[in-house]
Amino acid sequence: MKFFKLTPLFLLLHSIHLTAQETSTSVVDELDPLIVTGKAESLIGTAGTASKGQANYEELLERPYLRRGELLEVVPGVIITQHSGDGKANQYFVRGFNLDHGTDFSIWMDGQPVNFVTHAHGQGYADLNPLIPELVESVDYWKGPFHGHLGDLSTAGATRFNFFDTLPSGIASLGVGQHNYLHGLLADTIYLGEKSANGDFSALTYGLEYNYYDGPWQREGNSQRMNGFLKYFRQAGQDDFSLTAMAYDANWDSTDQIPKRLIDSGGIDRLGNIDNTVRGESSRYSLMADWNRDEANGSTHVNGFIGTYDMDLFSNFTYFLNDPVNGDQFEQEDGRWFLGGEVRREWEYGTENTFTVGLQTRHDFMSGIGLYNTVGTVRTNTVRVDDVTQSSAGIYAMADHRLNPWLRVQPALRADGFHFDVNSDNPLNSGTETDGIVSPKLNVVFGPWNDTEIYASAGLGFHSNDARGVTITTDPVTGLPVTAADPLVRTFGYELGVRTEAFENIVSTVSLFYLHSDSELLYVGDAGTAQPGPATERFGIEWATYWRPNEWLTLDNELTLSEAKLLNDPAGNEIPGAVPVTMNTGFTIGHDEGFYSSLRSRFFSSRPLIEDGSVDSRQSWQVNGRLGYRKDDWELALDVLNILGREDNDIEYFYTSRLPGEPLAGVDDIHLHPTEPRTFRVSLTKRF
């Protein structure tokens, strides 16, 4: 019923399309054909590292996925899970990093960053729910601190989702499934007038999406999400300009992770919960502008963004450990305005050489970022509330220069400056801090020989810490003195790789990598304190192969083996949650019309849950599939998620919690959020 409340709005947008259809037809007929690229396409001669890659629109839409964030698994070695509520940002894992909700992996939507610094729930918080997958034309990804245009929160890697300027066709889609799953989408491009003799045109692309899902949990999820998208695009001679508005609003009820001991004793079902009142709501509204000009000797790019964001999240992970009477439920509230942009100029010289300089800036204005004790979502105590302004600017220069037919170098130099200003409810935790850092980088490319290139990369990077942890002097709970975190933490890495296309229709890459962080100092949003950590190192190998033997069959396999270690930590050298083995495998079969299918397998191994390595998680192996039929402009598809019906766990932690009747000191235990059982979904799509 919730979907049909939106039907008039869907019909209104569709009527706009029909009204403009006659005008737009002549434009569509004259537009250049869409050229798609993907992970099996050649990057010989352009990529600077073996781990640089791209994926396209078709690859994204052919993947069956349970959650929006799983789109990021198109990046080799990336694993996406969830530990509480469908509206929260996902848990991210890559190259031995347990990235929590996004720290050290930066994500972009066109020119707008997804990650939030100094977020109420954790540094680098990256929520992909505002993304509409059908509007993404391509995905670019990078690994390691080797790229001059990538700054804060990108040591492990970065991803950029690039939206369509104009859609190849209109889309009307309706999906239904188990556990009250409902999805509706209407999107199209309206061309504003006819294309001129020299190819100039204007267009307006819109998208409206609605999602509802209860999930398999004993407590219904009541997860509702609405996304809106509106993009004006103008191409005029050497220039193109776009203005993009995005809107996202969501609310949900949560089933948090639960203690294993309670499941084993029969006190609770795997799909059960303990606190029936935890929930969340979030919204994000933004405006982006983008201008590009092709020059005779290069190009100029300018983009800017401004937006507002809110989140209110209630959680309870320790139950009755800290407060045996009222319980340990807490609320995290985040509200901010954010703005920034980039100016970039690229010069071409010689036949294959480029030199680029750029300036990036970002400013977050946060009002009332709060942490509260609650009972049944009613506030009983304020732990801390802060007004925060965090600003940064980065300038970079990078080159791509071919010294001879078999040697190419990509040197880069980046300098970043940050300013933190915290006004806390406790004046002892207020203050300002300014810091800067310089990061040189270098990629060297040998070849190509026999359609093969060899890459050697080294670079310095960094990540910022939460502003509240930078200025803190007093623990907001105990009142005891605490040590503030460093504003910026140095990271560095090396990578040696090979990319080969020597075999017909096959692209294969191998990367040996090493990453070091001087300290994993993190602000612990659930406790309101800064927690200093030791230095860390990660090393391993990543191997990805893509085979496209013909136009109707694609196969791929991505394997990552990594070792993650804490350095000089008396508690042990294991990094909790660091996954040593991941493997993603899949194939897609089908023509543009007729039956098609896609099958994907995702494996991640057991991992240590405590520094001394005495407790490990279970491994997880999930298989998802899609079977569909296309005819003319219609498509019918069946998704089966967790085909094998395995009772794996999305996430596992090891910490102390207390249930009623247990000792006041609590019990050390594994706390888990199970994978969802086998789930069926059906979708019907009309393209027009």
Image: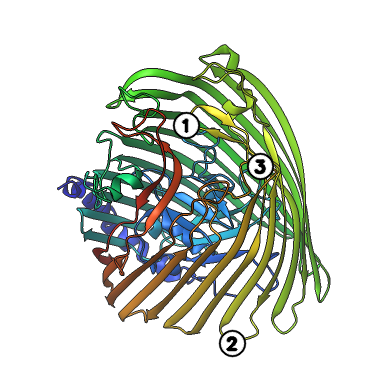
Q: Position of residue 363 (x, y in %)?
A: 58, 32
Q: Which residue is mark 2?
A: 504
Horizontal relation, residue 547 to residue 67: left or right? right
Horizontal relation, residue 185 to residue 194: left or right? left
Are discs 3 and 1 less than 8 Å apart at CB?
no
Residue 612 appears anywhere in the view? yes
The disc, 3 or 1, on the residue closer to the chain's N-terminal end is 1
Q: How many marks?
A: 3
Residue type indicated by callout 3: Asp
The disc, 3 or 2, on the residue closer to the chain's N-terminal end is 2
Give the Cα distance between marks 3 and 1. Answer: 27 Å
Q: Residue furthest right?
A: 403
Residue type indicated by callout 2: Glu
Q: Residue furthest left?
A: 1
Q: Is residue 470 above or below residue 596?
A: above
Give the Cα distance between marks 3 and 2. Answer: 49 Å
Q: Position of residue 329 (x, y in %)?
A: 35, 29
Front-most of residues 7 and 468: 468
Residue type indicated by callout 1: Ala
Q: Residues within 10 Å of mark 2 (few under 14, many from 20)?
A: few
Q: Residues within 10 Å of mark 1 (few under 14, many from 20)?
A: many
Q: Say which residue appears at 54% left-offset and 75% top-offset.
A: 40
Instruction: In the rendered structure, find residue 569 and report the number of the disc placed on it.
Output: 3
Q: Which residue is mark 1?
A: 120
